[in-house]
Each structure stands twice: as structure tokens, then as C-alpha cells.
Amino acid sequence: MDKTQYKNVFVFVEQRDGVIQSVALELLGKARTLADVLGEKVVAVFLGSKISDSCNALIEYGADEVILVDNPNLKDYITEQYTQAVSQVILNFKPSIMLFGATTIGRDLGPRLAARLGTGLTADCTKLEISEDTKELMMTRPAFGGNLMATIMCTNHRPQMSTVRPGVMQKMPQDKSRKGVVTPFAPKFDTSKFIVKLIKTVKEDKGLVDIADAKVLVSGGRGVGCREGFDKLRALADVLGAEVSSSRAMVDAGVMPHERQVGQTGKTVRPDLYFALGISGAIQHLAGMEESEFIVAVNKDKFAPIFKVADLGIVGDVNKVVPLLTERLKKKL
Amino acid sequence: MKILVCIKQVPDTTEIKIDPVTKTLVREGVPSIMNPDDKGGLEVALQLKDQVGAEVTVITMGPPQADLILREAFAMGADRAILLTDRKFAGADTLATSNALAGAARTMDWDLIITGRQAIDGDTAQVGPEMAEHLNIPQITYVAGLEYDGKKFTVKKETEEGYQLLEFEGKCLLTVLASAYKPRYMSVGGIVDAYSRDVEIWTAEKIDLAEEKLGLKGSPTKVIKSFTKGLKQAGEVYEVDTEEAVGIIISKLKEKYII
Amino acid sequence: MDFNLNKTQQLFRQMIREFADKEVKPLAAEIDEQERFPEETVRKMAKLGLFGIPVPKEYGGAGGDNIMYSIAVEELSCCCATTGVVVSAHTSLCVAPILEHGTEEQKMKYVPKLASGEWIGAFGLTEPNAGTDSSAQQTTAVLEGDEWVLNGNKIFITNAGHADIYVIIAMTDKSLGNKGISAFIVEATTPGFSVGKKELKLGIRGSSTAELIFTNCRIPKENLLGKVGGGFPVAMKTLDGGRIGIASQALGIAQGAMDETVKYTKERKQFGKAIAAFQNTQFQMADLQTKVEASRLLVRSAAFKKDQHVPYSADAAMAKLFAAETAMEVTTKAVQFHGGYGYTREYPVERMMRDAKITEIYEGTSEVQRMVIAGKLFGK
């Protein structure tokens, strides 16, 4: 394989029902950074049916070129249809790097493509950088349930492929003045291989969430005190797309239900972000959350034990900090 | 019906700790288990065995001690067990692993292949789909439900927003979610018999695969370094007014890419 | 001499540990609080074959050994002593005597359904006036034509009311003393057989303990178990096996209490450090750990000897004596180490302490065990 023939950073733009997914825009932002280091282009690969009107948005978020694959076979994601189209795009345009969102679609398509093309794929990357000497992609990802980080490279095969989870990378600010090119591409489908049929797609309200699955938890304790206090926490949680949880004291007081209790006699959680609000940090509580990725604690008492494990501690009144934080975040997000 | 189930022996990652001095993973004393998603897959296969009398073969690519999960599979109800083990497989990334498993599958008869969605050590979710591609059969990932009417399969695939219903006839590879299936326990009778049954040991020679596709040689991706994240320690504590506090929180969250 | 469990026994322990942890432990407090028989767990255990562990395959069992059976009762009891005794009483006190003393017809009729858990078993020996002095039987069995007619009552019978099959000891000829006692198999649906009030107990509160009442209860002549007048040795041999079960239960309770206490003392801080860091805790726990381990070796040794078909009566007695007294000591200390919290029902150690006490009493009190051991020592 002649690596020099492969150039540019491609991004698979995931759409569902014609709506471009946020992860795609985040990847365009990252691709922009990588491409700038390489002095190459960012190319969005956009598959779907009747989606041509959305191409501009991709350019506004950082793409220099959009390869538009608009075909009725691609209306809904089905593995074989998409794999045929994207592999043809790759063989035709020869990207050096291609990024995919690590979603149920990306994690289905990515490996299928990697095997079809005989190249390497690195999943769930949390960091992507270009190596200074070889100008190749360095992909860092967690393993062993998040206990270990590994940096991986795909030196002799192209494209270097990576999946990245939503919310890890940052999208660029939208720039309506950006200009770019739209290149239509018509794949040749082998319909004899379309064996799996999509019968229907169902959207469900996931209802009662298991706090152990939440990526962000807004947790309240005695410092929050009452139902009205927890309403404020719920507002913060809504802005962050988070779940509300609680210490034992509030469950015992009947303010919160037992399924939302964090701690030794409740649940053990390991979210990416844990707000410990008005929680003192008794050992039974810490046992349930101290492995959270990032802990923000707010408590009136500066000697509260929670501050020993918090990544960020604020000595203050929860009932004042939370509403202001909610308001500010609403404006930003 | 013949079903091939791919399973993997993994360390129980919920028990793994980091050595505070050497900053490396402490693997000693961490129990090895059958990967949860794979166990879910085995349960799917055993339910089909209960329903239509399918023959269930389990295969694992691993070191000799992976024998234990094959015995577990026997005790749960599997009919045949294969241990694919060879030094030549060492250093394999997901492409090389999927190639080896596909090579083994090519020497056998099967109607359906079931794998777990992902292993809790690698967390890649790649081996199943890559194996399906090598074998030129369709795939359905994130399987949370399955029905078979004697001719066609109707599969429930879990998505972020809910689920999809998909249908197929003929051969296919499914990757299964542990959360969707409560696997049966090993039965006492099954356990008593487990060690008197035959585990077939296959080496690289037995499978249909070119040597350059094996192990490190057959791996396009390579780990160039690995490191542990730091242990939790107290961060900064600020005693400031509400306005400033909120400002600090927001800027820290931005810094961490959380917002 | 290999002190290790073999691979099959290890695989079995892995399964029963997971089962106990996921299916039994979550219900333990509720079972105790509500004093209810763990019906749903019994169904699950039956499905896996846990009611026929040491039963040969030709009688519908799993074909396992007594070590596996002992491990099962231990691991179940570690989480819930009630659940452990359901399996123990059924297996050692009902299935075992039918397997060991029954005719082929009796075995084929009763054992498969007992082994599959479709039927639950129990054993009736104890009476209001015959406890430790078990030979003072007053329940009578009289042969009338083709039937034995039973009259009398049994008390403190484990699994009473939930069992389908009972092995019952009764007096057939008072003038012959011990040699006038016989054993019978009684089906719960037999007219003239009824179960009395359930006892309200200190511990193993979910275990159903009640009186059995025989009022002209007629059973077929074929339901005599063993020989006429051979019932006392049947009862004694049955209790030998039962002692392995109870010793395993006591061991499980002790182990459960140790695990809870290690966890608690590592987390609870007073005077600036974990109470596990104090030498008082460490030294006492070391002593308790040694006793628990010694219990385990005695239990395994007794089970091993039973598997080897060599005499094991004194070994089972030593195992039960030591394990029961250890369980009582460990659980009492466990509550102490938990302090005030240990006295509340929020932590499981108070239940473990209440559960431990019965192991010193039933299936032969510690005093009886001493009689058995001394009997072997001094040659009776």
C-alpha cells in the first residue's frame, strides 16, 4: 500500500431521519484541528436520502468538501447498504484518516468497513493527535473498563480509522461565511447482498433510568433539604441531560426514592461528572461515588469530608449556587 | 439448526485496581470470567436450543486457562466446545482476532453465529462485525431480542432512542447485549459432567487462514504505549461568592470538555 | 492428601456463590422480617438441581458428592441461613434415608421427584417428650392388615407444611425399647396427617417449623422404610448425615458474619482511624478466622469420609459441635464490632447471630454431639 496516495481527514456524518447528529459536528471540529496540522482538507461523507439541503451546515461547521451520497437505499441505516457506499467512497477518494461517531451506527459500520478494507480501526477514542515526526494519527482510548489508557497507531494501513463517542470532542463555532465544495457520489449497489430488512424503528421514552448508567449525576443531600430544593436540582439536571440522585439522608426523609440513593446501602455509580450538592461526604456515601471521573462538590461547611475527594470544591450555599449555575448553563447550551 | 457462539475469557474489570506506587494495573487476584455480553449470547443460543433443538458449539480464542469458560458453557448446556489456542495468535488486534475466528468458522457447519457486543477488557465491539465481514454474512449488532418462526428471524436491535425491528432469513452474525438477557446458571448436573466432556483444542494449522493474517503480523493497529489515569485526590477548594463560584464551575467543566 | 477442591467442586462453588449472591442475599432480610418460606428461591434452586446434589443420576439427581452438597449449604447459609436449612433438611433428612434404606420401588417412587425439587422433603423424629432423649418415642404405628396406622405428634419439624414427603419415626413395639422403633415414608396428602401451628422463633425465621399431627393416619404397608424395629439406627444414621448439613450451615453463617465484619471495620472510623487498624480488632478477628477455617476443615473432612463410605459419625459430630459454637462466637463478636449499628436490623449481623443459635441445638444439641464423640473416644 502506498501511503502517500492517501490524504485528507474524512468524517462520516451520521444522520437519523435527516437530522445531522451532534457527534458528526464534533468530529468535524476535531478533523479541522487535525487537518490544519497536516495541511490537508476536512471532507464530510454524508449519506442519506433527500439530504442535499443539509450540506451547507457541514461546511459551516468546518468541512472543506462534502461528498454527498444521496440515494433511497440509504434512507435508514442498514449495515450492508452503508458499508457498500462508504467503502466505495474510501476506495475512490483515498482518505488518510476517517472518523466515525461511536454510536450504535458507528460501532456497527466502522468495524464492517475496517474488515472490508483490511485496515485498522480504533474504538472510543478520547484523544486524537498527529505525531510530530511521522505525521500519523495517534489514537488514545480507555480499556479494562476505563482503568487503563492506551495509545494506538495504524502505521501501515489506510485509512487510519477511529470512532469517537458523542460529547468527547468539541464542535467549532458555526461560521456561516465558510465556503466549501459539494461533490455528489453515486455508489454502485449490489442489491443481492441486501439480506437484512428493516421492519420498523421505534422511539421509546426510556422511563425510569438506572442512576448507575447515567453519565452525569446531580446528587443532593441534607444541604438541599426538601422537595423544593430537589426541584432546583432537577432543573440543573435537565439542562445537562443528567439524572438526579441523592444521599441516604434524603431517601430516609422520604424526599427521594430508594432507587436514586447513592452509597453503601444504595447504588455504586461511576459517572463522568458527579455533582455532590449539600452532601457532607460520609464514608457510606463516598463508597458509592468516589470513583466518579470528575466530582464537583458544593457545601456550606469547609471541613466537610466530601472536599477530600472532590476535583472541584465550592464552599457555599447550594440553594444559591445551583439556580445561578442552571441559568448560566441554559444560556450557554 | 447449528449455532456457533464466540466467547471470551476476560478479567473481571470491576475488580481491577491500580497500584498506587507503580501506577500499573494490579491483575493478581482478579477473577477471570466469561465476558458478560458473550454469556448473553450463549443464553440466546441455549434458548434456541430449548425452542428448536439447535446444536450449540462454543469457541474461544485464548490461552489454555480459557478452558474454564468452555466448561462453564458445557454446564450451561452447550453441546460442543473448541479452544482455539496458539502462540501464533499472540499480539492480535481485532482484525487479526476476527480473521482467526473466521478461519475456524470456515472449517465448520453453522447456520447462525452469535457473539457478544463487546468484551469488558478491550471494549471495542469490533470482532463480531469484522468476523461477519470475513465470512461474507450479514450482521445485526446490539441485539436485545430475538424471535424465530422456523424460517425467519425477527431481531430487536437496541438504539440510543429506542429500538429497531429487523428481519432476515439464512445465515447471519448477531452481537448480543448482556443487559437484555439474564443468562441461566450452570445446572448441578451440568457441572458434574463438565470436566468429563471433551474440549477440542485447535491450533493455527487447523484453521483456514494465511499465516501473515495471524497475530501481531496480521494486526494493522499497534499499541505504542499504555498508562493508568491518576488516583483521585483532592482538587482545589474555593471559598468565594456565588457569582464567582458559578463562573469557576463553568470554566472547569468547559476545560474538561464536559460542556 | 489433597486439601484442594477438585475442578468440578470449584466450578460448583463458583455457581452457587453467584446464585447465593444474586438470588438469595437480596431477599434474606425480608425473609427474616416477614418470617416467610423462601418459595421463589426454592423454585429457582429446584430448576438448577440443588435439591438432588448427592443423588445418583439413575434416581434423577445430579450425581454430585457430599463435598458439593456441603459447599451448597455453606454458601447459601452465608447469605441466608433459612434458605440453607431448607436444602439441608430436605437432602440429608429425607432424601438420604430413602436412598440409603429404601427398597428399589421406594427409591424409584420418591427419589426422582424429591431430587428435582418437585417434592420437598422433611423428617419427623422429635416429640414433646422426646428431644435429646429421642428414643422416648410416643408416636405409635400399628399394622392393621395392609396398612400402618400412625397416631401421635411430632414437634419442631423443619420444612413442615411445605414438604410433600416426610420420613417419620414411630414406636411399633414399646416392649422392645430402641429395637421397637421403625421408620416410615408419609405423603403429606395422606388423610389423618396434618400440620399444626408454625413456631415463632428467634432465628431462621423464614424456615417453616411446626408440629405434625397423626390421627389414625393410614399409610400403605409398603411405606415402611427399612425393617420393622430398625427405625432407630435409620434415625441415627440420618442424623449423622444431617450433621454435615448443619455444620455447613453454621460454617456459612460464621463466614458471612466474618465477611461483613471485615468490610465494616475497614470502613468505620473512630479516633481518626479505621477500627480495623486497632490491634484489639485484629487479634480478635485473627482468632475467629482461625476457628472458622478449622470449622471448614472439619466439615470437609466429614463430608469426604461420607463420600468414601467409611465411618464418619464422630467426624460429623465434631464438625457440627465446633462449627456451631464457632458460629455463635463469631456472630456475637460481629455484632459487637458493629457497635450500635450491629444491633439494628440495617446490618445483617444481628440476624446472623439469631440464626447461629439454632445450630447448637437442632439435629442433636452440642451435648449430644459430645456424647457421640466421647462414645467413639472411649469405645462404646
Image (spheres, coloured by chain):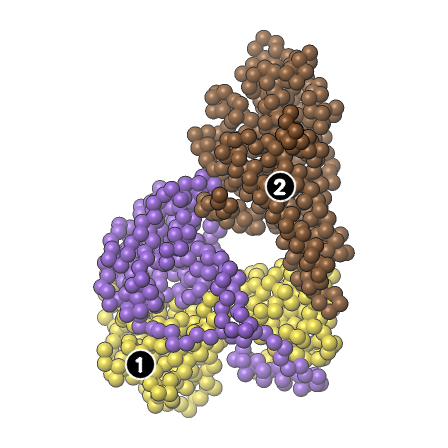
Left/right of residue B108 with respect to residue C357 in the rendered view: left
Left/right of residue A82 with respect to residue C146 in the rendered view: left
Residues behind callouts 2 and 1 on a single chain: no
**Residue B143 location, x and y as percent?**
41, 57
- Circle 2/circle 1 CB separation < 8 Å: no
Looking at the rendered structure, which numbered label has been put on residue C249? Answer: 2
Chain C colour as displayed: brown
Within 10 Å of disc 2 (Cα), the crowding (few <14, some 14-19, many 20+) is many
Rendered residue at 47%/75% (across/down): B227
**Residue B234 location, x and y as percent?**
63, 77
Query: What subunit carries mark 2?
Result: C
Which residue is tagged 1? A96
Looking at the rendered image, the disc whose residue lies closer to the viewer, 2 or 1, is: 2
Is C296 situated above or below A19?
A: above
Looking at the rendered structure, which numbered label has been put on residue B18? Answer: none
* Kind of residue at disc 2: Gln
Query: What subunit carries mark 1?
Result: A
Element type where label 2 sits in the image: helix
Is B67 situated above or below A136?
A: above
Q: Nearer the viewer, residue C109 or C53?
A: C53
Element type where label 1 sits in the image: loop
Rendered residue at 66%/41% (across/down): C322
Work out which residue is located at the far top of the displayed protein and give it.
C145
Q: Nearer the viewer, residue A282 or B137?
A: A282
Chain A colour as displayed: yellow
* Kind of residue at disc 1: Ser
User: Can residue C35 be seen in this snapshot?
Assistant: no
Q: Which chain is purple?
A: B
**Residue C152 location, x and y as percent?**
70, 19
